[in-house]
Image (cartoon, rainbow, N blue to C red):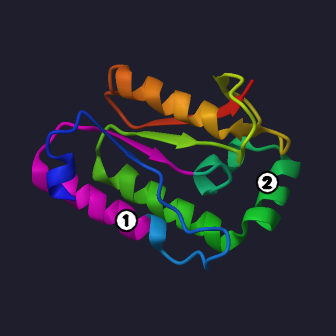
């Protein structure tokens, strides 16, 4: 992993257990290894981590109904793993961007927007819009502090 990131301007991670697999610690184990490799490389890479909406860190952003639905649909174990991943990044001190998409779908791109205020359970993000957001983040100046970004398709 070290050789893949040592000269990178931007490192994007989207690791997660598949919906069919047990949640486990896939996100946090991979994030821990990535953070160690970034520290070892001494690179000044912009870390962009695709997380998930609904973990502890974003619970206040969800409407009451959305919190209930996300807990039931996504599952407490998966959201706890989201929390572990985000805490590793937070405690690393790296000025990263954590992208928190709502439910993903395969509809065509329609544009994305940042969600401010309460997010409803009906929010969706088209995978193409997520890719566009990640490309925009890769070409914009990196943040100087940890940044959380919740986005949804227009």
Quarter occupied by the N terminus: bottom left
Q: Position of residue 88 (x, y in %)?
A: 38, 59
- Residue 47, by quadrant, is top left
Q: Quadrant of the C terminus?
A: top right
* Residue 41 on the magenta segment: yes
Rounded to the nearest whole Å, what is the CA distance between mark 2 and mark 1? 26 Å
Using a 10 Å C-alpha cutoff, classify the residue at mark 2 as few (fewer than 14 neighbours), some (14 to 19) or many (20 or more).
many
The crowd level at tag 1 (other Cα within 10 Å; few <14, some 14-19, many 20+) is some
Which residue shows up at 32% across the image and 37% down it? 95
In the figure, is residue 43 to the left or right of 76? left
Magenta span includes 127 = no
Give the residue at the far right of this rendering: 65
Q: Nearer the viewer, residue 62 or 131?
A: 131
Numbered-mark total: 2
| Residue located at (46% from left, 60% from top) | 85
Left or right side of 79 for 71: right
Instruction: Tell me the mark number nearer the camera, choosing from 2 and 1.
Output: 1
Q: Which residues are magenta?
A: 28-51
Q: Residue at x 67, y 74 (%)?
A: 20
Tell which circle, 2 or 1, labels the residue nearer the N-terminal end: 1
Q: Tell me residue 112's x, y (percent).
A: 65, 25
Residue 40: x %, y % from top left: 12, 56
**SS of the residue at dot 2?**
helix
User: Can you say whether 84 is above or below 64 in the image?
Assistant: below
Of helix, strand and loop, which one carries label 1? helix
Q: Which residue is mark 1?
A: 30
> Left or right of 45: which side holds 151?
right
From the viewer's perspective, is residue 117 above or below residue 23?
Answer: above
Query: Which of the pair 32/153 is nearer the observer?
Result: 153
Q: Are marks 2 and 1 in contact (CB under 8 Å)?
A: no
* Residue for badge 2: 67
Residue displayed at 24% across by 33% down: 9
């Amino acid at each position: 992993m070290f050789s893949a990131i040592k000269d990178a301007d931007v490192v994007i991670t989207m690791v997660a257990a598949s919906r069919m697999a047990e949640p486990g610690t896939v996100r946090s184990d991979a994030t821990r290894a990535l953070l160690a490799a970034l520290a070892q490389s001494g690179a000044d890479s912009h870390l962009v981590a695709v997380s998930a909406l609904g973990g502890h860190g974003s619970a206040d952003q969800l409407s009451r109904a959305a919190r209930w639905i996300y807990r039931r649909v996504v599952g407490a174990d998966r959201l706890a793993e989201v929390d572990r991943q985000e805490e590793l990044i937070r405690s690393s001190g790296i000025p990263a961007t954590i992208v928190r998409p709502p439910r993903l779908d395969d509809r065509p791109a329609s544009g994305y927007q940042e969600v401010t205020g309460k997010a409803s359970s009906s929010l969706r993000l088209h995978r193409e819009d997520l890719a566009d957001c990640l490309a925009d983040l890769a070409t914009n100046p990196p943040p100087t502090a940890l940044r959380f970004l919740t986005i949804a398709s227009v």
